[in-house]
Amino acid sequence: MIPFAEIERARQVIDGVAVRTPLVRLDVEADAEIWLKLELLQPVRSFKIRGAGNAILTATDGQLADGVLTASAGNMAQGVAYAARLRGVPATIVVPDSAPRAKLDAIERYGGRVVPVPYEEWWNVLVTGSFDGAGGMFVHPVADPRVQAGNGTIGLELLEQSPDFDAVVVPYGGGGLVTGIASAVKAKRPEVSVYSAEPETGAPAAAAFAAGAPASVGFTPSFVDGAGSGSLLPAVWEQASQLLDGAFGLPLDEVAAAIRLLAERTRVIAEGAGALAVAAAASGRVSGKKIVCIVSGGNIDSGVVARILLGETP
């Protein structure tokens, strides 16, 4: 669990960089109230500015002497590039070669240097925290405590915005988002249930809950590029598993339907990972009377959105 004081400190650090996002109710026919924490309204269109901002803005000049390095499918990359630009240092971003063009364009727009590699090599950078040919301070997108504390500021806002929610659903990519949010929420309201949501094409957290222990699972890349994988990061899972009350693996058809639902009812466009929590809540899988869904990001290629809005599952 991330110390509550560190999360409060992170909020002070990123004040003026990240915005306080709204919590709005989703107009949907369901047994429970479903509320949306719209993190896709952040400056980089995802929650990642919170963690990246806290890590980079609190670093010393010496730590940043050679710039920053991260491994990201796109959203953390944008957060890191954005925060690095604020500090006036270069950012090198290692991305999987399946990353969507919309995210790559945004990274470059913020001044980041993009290095595409095969997925397995990208995952190795996440595990080792290093990449041959690139130096700089490594900002781990999920395992860095400063990143997790920044993510936890979402939980602080939820506690202030709603006194009576009884469940939170969070997309699970590497576990840093749910660890931060749950640390904040459960510190003040331990009775609240926290669940994770993944695409069933790569749902190791759901598999770990089902089996009672972590295990590798099959992984197929999909339009839900910001969540899902073939395995868990052990150190992060050790934290997350102590905070989670359950995990769901969602069919891609349901995730696409959730994107359409958000577009039709709220007029916001979520990326695949951003719609995972909504897919879980709208399906009735989540126990609770008032459920908060973390809509984590909105960086999705226009062509993919068009296909989804026309009823397809890419």
Image (tube, rainbow, N blue to C red):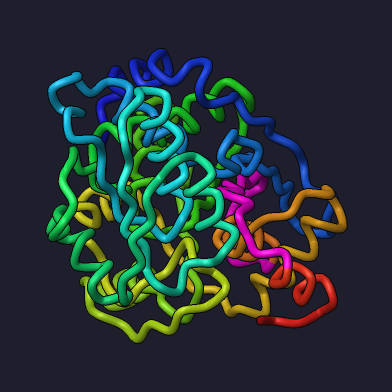
Q: Is residue 167 left or right of residue 40?
A: left
Pick the front one: 173 or 130: 130
Question: In the rendered image of this protein, does residue 147 appear above or below residue 118?
Answer: above
Q: Is residue 237 left or right of residue 296?
A: left
Residue 237: tell me if it is visible: yes
At 49% from the left and 40% from the top, the residue drawn is 110
At 31% from the left and 30% from the top, the residue drawn is 89
Pick the front one: 95 or 12: 95
Name the spot of residue 218 as percent of width and height, x first. Answer: 35, 86
Name the spot of residue 50 as percent of width and height, x first. Answer: 44, 32
Q: What stretch is highlighted in magenta?
A: 283-302
Whether residue 289 is in magenta: the answer is yes
Name the spot of residue 307 as percent of width and height, x first. Answer: 77, 76
Quadrant of the rendering where the C terminus is positioned:
bottom right
What secondary structure characterizes most of the magenta part? loop
Question: In the rendered image of this protein, does residue 284 appear above or below residue 192?
Answer: below
Pick the front one: 270 or 132: 132
Tally of numbered tags: 0
Whether residue 260 is in magenta: the answer is no
Name the spot of residue 293 as percent of width and height, x first. Answer: 61, 48
